Image (tube, rainbow, N blue to C red):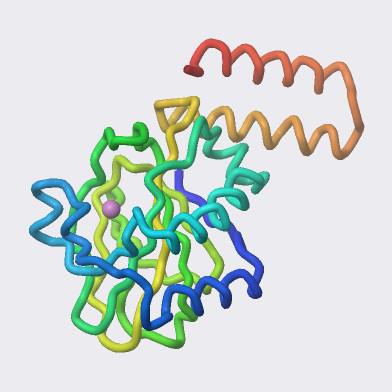
Amino acid sequence: MRFRLEPLLHPQRVSELQTALQAADAPWRPGEETAGWHARTVKNNHQLDRHSDLHAALAPSLRQPLLEHPLFRSAALPVKVHSLRFSRASAGEGYGRHVDNAFMAEGRSDLSFTVFLSDPASYEGGELVLEHPDREEALRLPAGHALVYPSTLLHRVEPVRSGTRLVAVGWVQSRIRRAEERELLFELDTARRSLFAQEGKSEVFDLLCRSYANLLRLWGE
Ligand code: NI
């Protein structure tokens, strides 16, 4: 299951990020430096130096809103959000077809996310394309919106044809390793919340809560 956070960031925060990332002295590095051995051959973009002061200053402004977002919490069940990086692609740059590494220095990747930081009207191309078993899905979200998708999917970023595409990407280690189990828990959580909204704390609500908590105990880690 993939889902959108619409929006994740306030417009004010987005424009602050844009200004900081587009500053002349922002420490951008070739993206291939942080790709795995096979992804390196198709990764053609730039990334903000992860050891820079600027990265350290900007990263919390994304991690915090994610961890506080109700949909993200319910659907991703995060243990942690990790390996955050800011990425820039200008005309001719993109990121060819690949799958993300399962294990990274900071954790396991169960879910991947992209936070779009550029106004879609300011660049052409640069679609994030997800390869589902039966179809391809090309996405360009408004600035400040985020897409969260299973790290199990092959995906790519189409070449940017004009302008500059700024995004932040990162990964989630979830309490629930399997996507099907995460989806069932998300549906159950949604059902009990809507029941609570309709009739408050009822006998059926208590039973749903019990099932939810006990499935988390069974499947969670
Ligand atoms: Ni990727």
Residue name at image x 19 percent, y 81 percent: 92
Residue name at image x 62 percent, y 69 percent: 13
Residue 138 % position (x, y): 35, 66
Q: How many marks?
A: 0
Position of residue 151 in the picture relative to residue 193 (left or right): left
Residue 163 % position (x, y): 34, 87
Residue 8 % position (x, y): 60, 60
Q: Is residue 204 above or below residue 102?
A: above
Asked whether 147 or 28 is in front, the reply is 28
Quadrant into which the N terminus falls:
top left
Asked whether 93 or 84 is in front, the reply is 84
Position of residue 62 in the picture relative to residue 190 (left or right): left
Question: Based on the displayed image, in which of its 4 quarters is residue 214 positioned?
Answer: top right
Residue name at image x 66 percent, y 15 percent: 211
Q: Is residue 81 above or below residue 28?
A: above
Residue name at image x 42 percent, y 80 percent: 22
Residue 127 % position (x, y): 33, 71
Question: Based on the displayed image, in which of its 4 quarters is residue 145 positioned?
Answer: bottom right
Position of residue 128 in the picture relative to residue 118 (left or right): left
Position of residue 199 in the picture relative to residue 24 (left or right): right
Q: Is residue 76 above or below residue 188?
A: below
Asked whether 71 or 165 is in front, the reply is 165
Asked whether 158 or 190 is in front, the reply is 158
